[in-house]
Amino acid sequence: MGHQFDGLGSLAGYTELDLNLSMPQPLDRETALFDKNVEKWRNTHLGQFVLIKDDEVVGFYLSLGKAFTVGTGRFGLEPFLVRQIVPKDVVNVSLYGRRIHVA
């Protein structure tokens, strides 16, 4: 049985998982480069934002806004990756209610 377009925006016989696994996802290369280097970058660029396009580290920036400004200025509407370099085991804690007083 072959796969056919059903005219309703899907391919008959394919699941969404089949389609996602068979095609490279946007920013796969950039994410792989980030994952490969993030440990090293934590020692030198902690808290900064890295801008990556394809296999190139374009730069490190102190703000998300600056990284996006450089990225859109250089690449326009083409996809690029901006991620913040954070500690390995980040725990976000939110406190509600009364203010905590420290003696």
Image (cartoon, rainbow, N blue to C red):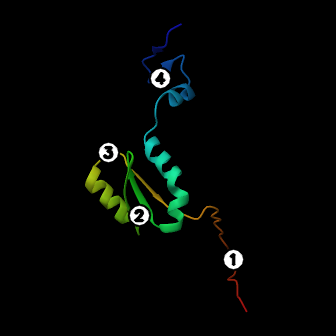
Dot 3: what SS?
Answer: loop
The residue sitting at 42% across, 18% down in the picture is 7
- Amino acid type for the residue under numbered disc 4: Ser
Whether the residues at callouts 3 and 2 have beta carbons within 8 Å, the answer is: no
The 10 Å Cα crowd at callout 2, few under 14, some 14 to 19, many 20 or more, is some
Cα–Cα gap, marks 1 and 3: 44 Å
Percent x, y of residue 3 = 49, 13
Depicted 18 relative to depicted 35: above or below: above
- Amino acid type for the residue under numbered disc 3: Glu
Q: Which residue is mark 4?
A: 10
Dot 1: what SS?
Answer: loop
Chain-order first, disc 1 or disc 4? 4
The residue sitting at 38% across, 45% down in the picture is 54
Cα–Cα gap, marks 2 and 1: 31 Å
Q: Which residue is mark 3?
A: 78
Dot 2: what SS?
Answer: helix
Which label lies toward us, 2 or 1? 2
Chain-order first, disc 2 or disc 4? 4
**Residue 97, numbered circle:** 1
Cα–Cα gap, marks 3 and 2: 18 Å
The 10 Å Cα crowd at callout 3, few under 14, some 14 to 19, many 20 or more, is few
**Residue 64, numbered circle:** 2
Give the left or right position of residue 101, taking residue 2 as reference.
right
